[in-house]
Image (cartoon, rainbow, N blue to C red):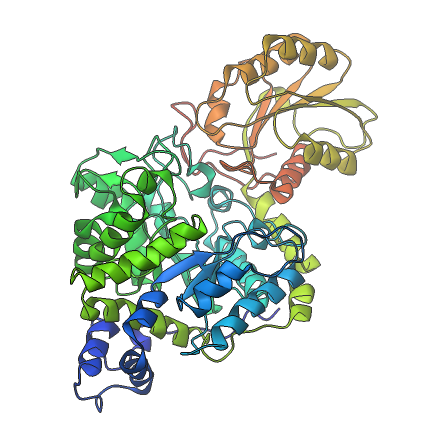
Amino acid sequence: MNFGRNRTTSRRRFIEGVGATGLAASMTGVAAGGDSSAVSPPNAVVAGYLDDLSIEEKIGQMVMVTTRGITGPHEMPPGETKTAIQNLNVGSVIVYNQTSPAYAATYNNKLQEWAMDTDPEIPLLVCADFEYGSAHNIDIGGTTHPRKMGLAASGSTANAVTSAEVTAEEIRSMGFTWNFDPGADVNTNPSNPVIGVRSFGGETETVSEFTEAMVEAYQDNDVIATPKHFPGHGDTDHDSHYDLPIVTYDEQTLHDVHLPPFQAAIDAGTDAIMTAHVIVEAIDDERPATLSKDVLTGLLREEMGFDGLIVTDAMSMDAIEDEWGTSDGTRLAVEAGADVIMATGTWQDQLDTYNALHQAYADDELSEERINESVARILETKLEYGTMDQYTVNPETAIETVGHPNHRDTAADLAQDGITLIHNDGNLLPLDPSANETVLVAGVEDLGTIRDAVEAETDATTLQFSASSHDPTPTEAENAGALAAGADTAIVQTYSQAAIPDGQLGVLESIANANTPVVGLSTGLPYDIGEYPDAVDAAVASYAIERWQSENPTALSAAVSVLFGAQPGGQLPVAIGDQYPIGHGESY
């Protein structure tokens, strides 16, 4: 398996002849007419661009747009995106939900062709979220990896490295250079509605070690890593997609608990960090991190020594949009220290983002020197990752690479390593795969995958009970119990984004009351196991499904394999109340 060249130099070492203040200061001096003879060749290239680019073209490099208006499975990017690339000279594009590897490669090639078909002929950084492998944004054919909490449950940073290596090879084959991963949030709040299993866990040291490992693995394999969401989204009880979260812990907690994973990433040479739309009262009690100069410049740049790209989270999220709007939010983010503004809203939002920066420049609120700092970082990153030389890909290579059977087998092994047996009363588990019995599969989320896995693993006859919502009614609970009376064993899937709904506990109770042995299979946050009724005989955590209920057949199938005899390899990366501490995990 070829995972690309070994990037053994960090960003700081890559920038020859430039001190800790970074490339931007040197480039600004050169662009202003300073002596370029002391600047090493890559820096001179960037300096040349800064001399040649118009202010409009420089501002465009700081804007990341998304594609909109896709109506068919093979449609190319819409005209609005072409306008953004060729008229606004945007520097990066974030892409969502491509249908297949070949389509994604062809689509991304078209974006790059548009960029190179106009002055100043600067290729794009093509970006996406691939938090759990290429399947995150490839509808058919991608490889699904364990969520971050599942990787951490394995206890092996080598597993995290392998996951990043496979993901990097697959997404690079489709033309993606920039991955918004890994999550560096320490999930200290069990009621966190948006991070959860996207985090490596609730222990700072573990999150730091796994973040560092994935950052190095991505960047050694030519993909820009992006630890997120700075300075930490793990202690929130609101989702910044819909609200503005505020964290009230003191500055010591911030430094002891939430910042170390980001510092580990910086020390490992991460080339990008994404901001959080979260107010951290200990630093700035008025503005979220994305818009706070105290956070982005004072804390991240000056105190922590980060000299790479600062990219905002999506500016269309309600945490920013409802309070500041696109234009003011954009201006404040750049004033705070952001280099790249993620404009993921409507086409008008994307135009407003560009226009806000241009207006700030026209009003002398944003200097060309400040713009040069960001553009220098952007261009240097494009040079470092080979985007300036190799910006298109071969769709046939993507077909051969993405979802390769070896990659899927590797992901399955990684998933099994993290499946955690929480308790096993009376040694109910493992179940006998050869028994000619009836197994009830009940629950609220993706039961088809679980049932298919049971049938693939066993000789059992299966029954299925699917609730109509995440909070089943008392009548549904009774119906589940009645169905369980005709089964030898019940596998009851639970899923929670924060607290487990009472209706799911009612289903567990009803099935247990039918005197049917019950296995509780937690497929979201593992905290729900702490609420299971005492009558549940065994409980397993799979960490499979996040806040958006994205499918994860790899982790769910691995969990079923464990139920029928595969050795559970996981230990809890978070504590489940006072019942099960971090590190707990049983085996057969």
Q: Compared with residue 431, is residue 397 higher up or lower down, i.e. above or below?
A: below
The residue under the point 74% across, 35% down is: 452
Instruction: Where is residue 1? Give x, y as percent.
Output: 62, 68
Q: Compared with residue 322, is residue 522 higher up or lower down, i.e. above or below?
A: above
The residue under the point 25% across, 48% down is: 328
Query: Is residue 63 shown left or right of residue 360?
Result: right
Looking at the image, can residue 525 be seen? yes
Q: Quadrant of residue 415?
A: top right
The residue under the point 21% across, 34% down is: 249
Instruction: Where is residue 218? Give x, y as percent.
Output: 46, 63
Query: Is residue 546 shown left or right of residue 268?
Result: right
Instruction: Where is residue 169? Give x, y as percent.
Output: 56, 65
Instruction: Where is residue 379? Give x, y as percent.
Output: 35, 73
The residue under the point 36% across, 61% down is: 63
153 or 308: which is nearer to us?
308
Q: Compared with residue 350, is residue 565 higher up or lower down, i.e. above or below?
A: above
Q: Quadrant of the C terminus?
A: top right
